[in-house]
C-alpha cells in the first residue's frame, strides 16, 4: 500500500512542486489548502504532469475541527509536510497578529493531529531567515539563530522552538526541519509555477514580469553592499530540486531511518549569486532583456547569505542539481504560459 502524506499548503509554489515529486516517488498525496494565496487550478497542473489528481480539502489549518475531520476521513496517514503559512515579510510587519495566528495556530493543530493520528513523521518548512545576517557564509546548521527581523521570520523561529519542545516530551513521531534558502523557478513542463498575487515582492517573479512588460522596470535594491558587484547575495535553489528534498526527508522518516527525533537540514546550492548576476544570467538564459535600474536599499534586507548543504547531501542523499540557467529558463517558460492563458 502507498504511504499517504498530507501536504498543508499543497497548492502553493513549493507545495505543488513537492506534490508532483511525492506522487512520482509513489506516495499518495492529500492536500489541505485554504486557497488564501493559491488557485484551485493548480490541481489541474499537477494532474497533467503526474496523471494523478491529489485528494484535496479546502480547509484552513487554524481550524482544528476541520483538520481532524479530514484526518478521520482519510484513514492512515504516514506523514505531514507542513507548508501552509503566510509568507510576505513586509505584510507581516503590518499585520503581525495575522502572521502569529496563521503560522503558529496551524502548526500546533498539525502537531496535535500528527500525534493523535499516529503519524510517523512531520516535516516543517522553515527558512534560512532563522540565521538572520550570518557572521559568515556558507551557513551550516550549527550557525547561531539571530534575532528575527520581521514577524514572519519570528514565526519561523518560534515554530522551530515549538516543534523542538513538543518532540522533547517523548511523543512518538520524528520531525525534520527543512531550512530553505531562496526557492525559484517552475516545473520544466510549465504546468505549475509561482503565482504571485499583485505586485511581486520576490526577485525572480519581478524579473519575469519586467521582462514580459507587465512591470516597467525592475528596481535593484542597492548596489553599495559589501559584495563584489555591490548587490545582495542569495542562494537560489530550483523549486524542483527543493521538492525532491522532501521526498528524501519523508522516505527517511517513514522507513524509520531518522537518527535523531528532530533533525535540521539546510536546503540550498552552496553557491551565492548576486541580484545583478541573477538578472544577467536570466537575460543569457532566455535572450530577453530585463529593464532595470539601481534604487536604494530595501529595509531589512540581508547583505549576503548562502548555505552549506553538506549535511543534506550526506545524510539525506540529496543534492541540488538543476543549473541556474535552466531554472531561469523554466521560470520564463512558466511566465509565457501565464500570458498564453491570459492570467497575466
Ligand atoms: N530584490 C530586488 N528587487 C526586487 C525584489 C528583490 O533587488 O524587486 C532583491 C532583494 O533586495 C534581495 C534579493 O533580491 O537582495 C532577493 O530578494 P527576495 O525578496 O526574492 O528574497 P529574500 O531573500 O529577501 O527573502 C526570501 C523570502 C522570505 C524568506 C527569506 C529568507 O521571500 O520569505 O528569503 O528565507 F524569509
Image (tube, rainbow, N blue to C red):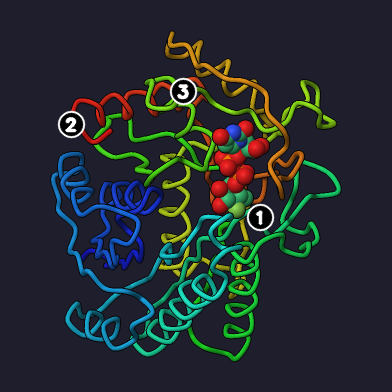
What residue lies at 38% left-to-right and 48% top-to-bottom? 13
Quadrant of res 106: bottom left
Q: Which residue is mark 2?
A: 341
Identify the residue position indicated by label 1 in the image.
129
Q: Secondary structure at mark 3?
A: loop
Distance of label 1 from label 2 (alpha carbons): 34 Å
- Give how far across and how far down residue 137 sits, in percent: 79, 41
State how far apart marks 3 and 1 are (Cα): 29 Å
Residue 216's label in the rendered image is: 3
Q: Nearer the viewer, mark 1 or mark 2?
A: 2
Residue 88 placement (x, y as % from top left): 52, 55
* Mark 1 sits near ligand 1, with its Cβ under 8 Å away: yes
Mark closer to the observer (3, 1): 3
Tell me: residue 193, above or below residue 213: below
- Mark 3 and mark 2: span between their CA atoms? 21 Å
Residue at 35% from the left image edge and 56% from the top image edge: 37
Q: Earlier in the sequence, mark 3 or mark 1?
A: 1
Residue drawn at (63%, 62%) of the image: 153
> Which quarter of the picture shows residue 150?
bottom right
Disc assigned to residue 283: none
Q: Is residue 268 visible?
A: no
Quarter of the image where the C terminus is located: top left
Q: Position of residue 287 (x, y in %)?
A: 43, 8
Decide which of tag 1 and tag 2 comes sooner along the chain.
1
Amino acid at each position: 500500500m502507498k504511504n499517504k502524506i498530507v501536504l498543508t499548503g499543497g497548492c502553493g509554489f513549493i507545495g505543488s512542486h513537492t506534490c508532483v515529486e511525492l506522487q512520482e516517488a509513489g506516495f499518495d498525496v492529500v492536500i489541505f489548502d485554504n486557497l488564501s494565496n493559491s488557485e484551485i487550478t493548480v490541481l489541474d497542473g499537477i494532474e497533467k504532469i503526474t496523471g494523478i489528481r491529489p485528494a484535496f480539502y479546502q480547509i484552513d489549518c487554524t481550524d482544528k475541527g476541520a483538520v481532524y475531520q479530514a484526518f478521520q476521513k482519510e484513514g492512515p496517514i504516514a506523514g505531514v509536510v507542513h507548508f501552509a503559512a503566510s509568507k510576505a515579510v513586509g505584510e507581516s510587519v503590518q499585520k503581525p497578529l495575522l502572521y502569529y495566528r496563521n503560522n503558529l495556530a496551524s502548526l500546533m493543530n498539525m502537531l496535535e493531529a500528527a500525534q493523535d493520528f499516529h503519524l510517523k513523521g512531520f516535516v516543517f518548512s522553515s527558512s534560512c531567515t532563522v540565521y538572520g545576517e550570518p557572521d559568515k557564509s556558507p551557513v551550516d546548521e550549527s550557525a547561531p539563530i539571530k534575532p528575527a527581523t520581521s514577524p514572519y521570520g519570528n514565526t519561523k523561529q518560534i515554530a522551530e522552538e515549538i516543534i523542538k519542545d513538543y518532540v522533547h516530551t517523548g511523543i512518538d513521531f520524528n520531525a525534520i526541519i527543512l531550512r530553505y534558502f531562496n526557492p525559484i523557478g517552475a516545473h520544466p513542463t510549465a504546468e505549475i509555477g509561482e503565482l504571485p498575487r499583485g505586485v511581486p515582492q520576490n526577485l525572480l517573479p519581478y524579473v519575469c514580469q519586467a521582462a514580459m512588460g507587465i512591470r516597467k522596470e525592475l528596481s535593484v535594491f542597492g548596489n553599495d553592499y559589501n559584495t563584489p558587484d555591490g548587490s545582495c547575495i542569495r542562494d537560489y535553489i530550483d523549486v524542483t530540486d527543493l521538492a525532491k528534498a522532501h521526498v528524501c526527508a519523508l522516505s527517511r522518516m517513514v522507513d524509520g531511518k531518522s537518527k535523531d527525533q528532530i533533525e535540521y537540514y539546510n536546503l540550498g546550492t552552496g553557491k551565492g549569486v548576486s541580484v545583478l548576476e541573477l538578472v544577467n544570467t536570466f537575460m543569457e538564459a532566455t535572450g530577453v532583456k530585463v529593464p532595470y535600474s539601481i534604487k536604494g536599499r530595501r529595509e531589512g534586507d540581508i547583505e549576503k547569505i548562502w548555505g552549506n548543504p553538506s549535511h543534506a547531501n550526506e545524510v539525506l542523499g540529496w543534492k541540488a542539481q538543476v543549473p541556474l540557467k535552466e531554472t531561469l529558463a523554466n521560470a520564463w517558460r512558466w511566465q509565457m504560459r501565464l500570458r498564453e492563458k491570459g492570467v497575466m
